[in-house]
Amino acid sequence: MKLKIVIVALLTVINSANAQNNTILQKNSIPIEMLFPQGKSKALILSFDDGRISDRHLVKLMNKYGLVGTFHLNSNKLGTNDYLAKEEIKNLYKGHEVSGHTANHPNLTTLPKQDVISEVLDDRKELERLMRSPVRGMSYPFGNTNDYVIEAISGLGIEYARTVGDTYNFRLPTDFLKWQPTIHLFGKTNYIPNDTENDKKELAQFYQLTSDFLKAKSLALFYVWGHSWEYEEPFNKWAEVEIFFKMIARNPDVFYTTQVGLVDYINAFKNLKFSVDKTMITNLSSIDVFVKASGKVFIIEAGSTIQLN
């Protein structure tokens, strides 16, 4: 009977770990929980699509409040009406991440495999030429994807891809190529024309979620996405954008990260190496990793081994 209880308890712990998106490694009887850098329990990603000229003002505001973002660009649209010039993006996005959004913004689910591949690779090549650094992720145009698209982009150097299927929760992604964000910036305000009551409801829900994130005690990722052109006329939301940025900026409990930065950190955690008795941990990556075990916070510095005690 005792053995049965132990097995059930162990399975409960393992299932709990799986439910938390592999952020807890169960090593014998010692649960080892991932923390974000500096031992923080909260992380924020701000992600914006398209590369319109309104990104200039958005980036200026983000820089003012010390925020970092991931910007998904359509390379063939750069230099056209209302889009940024190719020559300016390297300077503009300095300190942020530039990611792919396909060359021409088609619905990938309607294209043959060859065209899906071309859209993604052509975008990567041109953005890498402009940025002089590897482009390792993307967001799907219109948020549309399926297994066929994911199979097509596998092996193209795309390490993550974001949809637009808001989860309204703070969980980490279980599949980097089916990454669902938390919420669109300001929710679905202005989705229904001239519906003031719905806009108030959506905005209240957005700020409630923001408040819940800032008060969260367990591991939490707040992933907010949008488009800078949504804050221009006729909606004129720039004052609201600044209100939100003030709320979330410079919080000592929050890890501010790009999307690829979080991918690298999660992978570093998953690739930790353990001794047979599970009391020693080696970090072979180039990233310092923070974990919690037996109520204590440990840092496993890049290239080092620590003893749990």
Image (cartoon, rainbow, N blue to C red):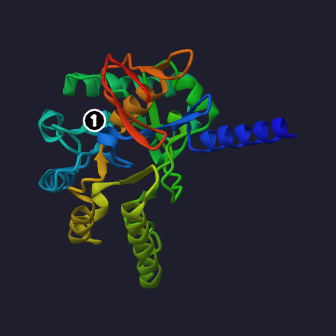
Task: Say which residue appears at 18% left-offset and 34% top-offset.
Answer: 86
- How many discs mark residues in the rendered view? 1
Residue 177 horizontal side relative to residue 208, left or right: right
Pointer 1: residues within 10 angstroms few (<14), some, or many (20+)?
many
Task: Say which residue appears at 76% left-offset and 38% top-offset.
Answer: 6
Is residue 72 among what the camera can see?
A: no
Residue 308 horizontal side relative to residue 27, left or right: left
- The vertical placement of 125 against 232, above or below, is above
**Residue 15 position in % (x across, y down):** 68, 41
Residue nearest the viewer, comparing 97 with 28: 28
**Residue 37 position in % (x across, y down):** 32, 38
Task: Say which residue appears at 82% left-offset and 35% top-offset.
Answer: 3
**Residue 57 position in % (x across, y down):** 16, 56
Quadrant for residue 80, please give it.
top left
Q: State the residue position of label 1.
A: 98
For the C terminus, give its image quadrant: top left
User: What's the residue type where badge 1 is placed?
Assistant: Val
Residue 162 horizontal side relative to residue 234, left or right: right
